[in-house]
Amino acid sequence: MPVLANRQKLLGTETAFETLAKAKRLEAEGKNIIHLEIGEPDFDTPYNIKQAAKKAIDDGYTHYGPSAGQMELRQTIANHQSSRQGYDISPENVIVTPGAKPIMFYTVMALINPGDEAIYPNPGFPIYESMINYVGGVAKPMRLKEETNFNVDIKELESLISDRTRLIIVNSPNNPCGSVIPNDDLKRISDVADAHDLIVLSDEIYKDMYYDRVEHCSITKFGQTKTRTVILDGFSKSYAMTGWRLGYGVFPDFMIDDVSKLVTNSVSCTSVFTQIAGIEALEGPQDSVSNMMKEFTKRREIVVDGLNSLKGIRCSIPKGAFYAFPNIENTGMTSQQFADKALYDGGVALLSGTSFGEFGEGFIRISFANSIENIQEGIKRISTIL
């Protein structure tokens, strides 16, 4: 009987897609489901971006391109990032990928030997831990606590570092917590990375999604971090382009050639006509981004107020992204019990906090990337299961 390689047992998953599949099966059986599980904007991709893709197809951008990406898009991204970050970024440091998730893969694969340690946020995006484990690394969780607004305790971070530590992963705004790392703490994390000569993977995919007029600040603005940081970003969230699979990383000089080889060995290149559409996304009108955030701001208030009105639930106000991460400990249910009951008894698809790591126990994640009417109905249904 053929067997798979042992490392396959180390792969985790992204529960949002599993829950979506369960919800779709229930819908096929005739059950009405409110979808608050999936992490994608419910808005359409802006018209000008779609038109640019159609034109690119007609213009013949349907063949292979360079593994690192079309130079015209890499230059556009470099200009965009230079403007946002406040320092010059070369297009040579930009590598374009089919979605932003490969940036996690390539960074971990390129840096972590078996036995090396990588520190990651927990609760946090589950693929961080999955990839560290897959390559034989040691995944060390950096606990994000409710009492610190789901931000890292710097002293605890320092206690996690050993002579085997190679990588620190930061994510701000954070999925699933909606938290934002204060600038002072970003500087302190940067100081820690500098002191121990560590690489930082800065997941900035939600950089356009702040509330209360907060401006994005990258860890690369402090110390020497920009010379040892991989910035992960992409088009999925800001421009409602999740299905387009278009992301990128800004890499330190010493990683560029080897990460480009990983692209060649794995996917060859990213779809070229989608890259041309990416140029339009960055250089075209940006009103779709601001309009989307105005709508998310309205939804955020409804979600937080609605959840806090329910017995046994308390919900802090997310400062970024489009997720709420309420505490459900006083309902008497575990996170998974709550998620299952919401889906099968209430017809609401949401995620257990443990989908984002062991320290997510006692919490659930709700995506408010849905209409106000559906959000209100979802909260009403949750109230019935309580």
Image (tube, helix red, strand yellow):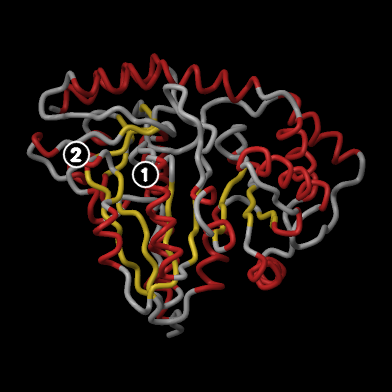
Q: Residues within 10 Å of mark 2 (few under 14, many from 20)?
A: many
The residue positioned 82% from the left and 34% from the top of the image is 54
Q: Quadrant of the N terminus?
A: bottom left
The image's mark for residue 178 is none
CA–CA distance in space, label 2 to label 1 = 13 Å
The residue positioned 63% from the left and 41% from the top of the image is 86
| Res. 317 image quadrant | top left
Q: Quadrant of the C terminus?
A: top left
The residue positioned 57% from the left and 18% from the top of the image is 291
Q: Position of residue 179 (x, y in %)?
A: 35, 38
Q: Which residue is mark 1?
A: 19
Which mark sits nearer the N-terminus, 2 or 1?
1
Disc 2 residue type (three-letter): Phe
Disc 1 residue type (three-letter): Thr
Query: What secondary structure is marked by label 1?
Result: helix
The residue positioned 8% from the left and 35% from the top of the image is 330
The image's mark for residue 338 is 2
Looking at the image, is 81 positioned above or below residue 269?
Answer: above
Front residue of 296 and 355? 296
Looking at the image, is 180 positioned above or below residue 290?
Answer: below
> As drawn, which residue projects farthest toward the bottom?
1
| Res. 362 image quadrant | top left
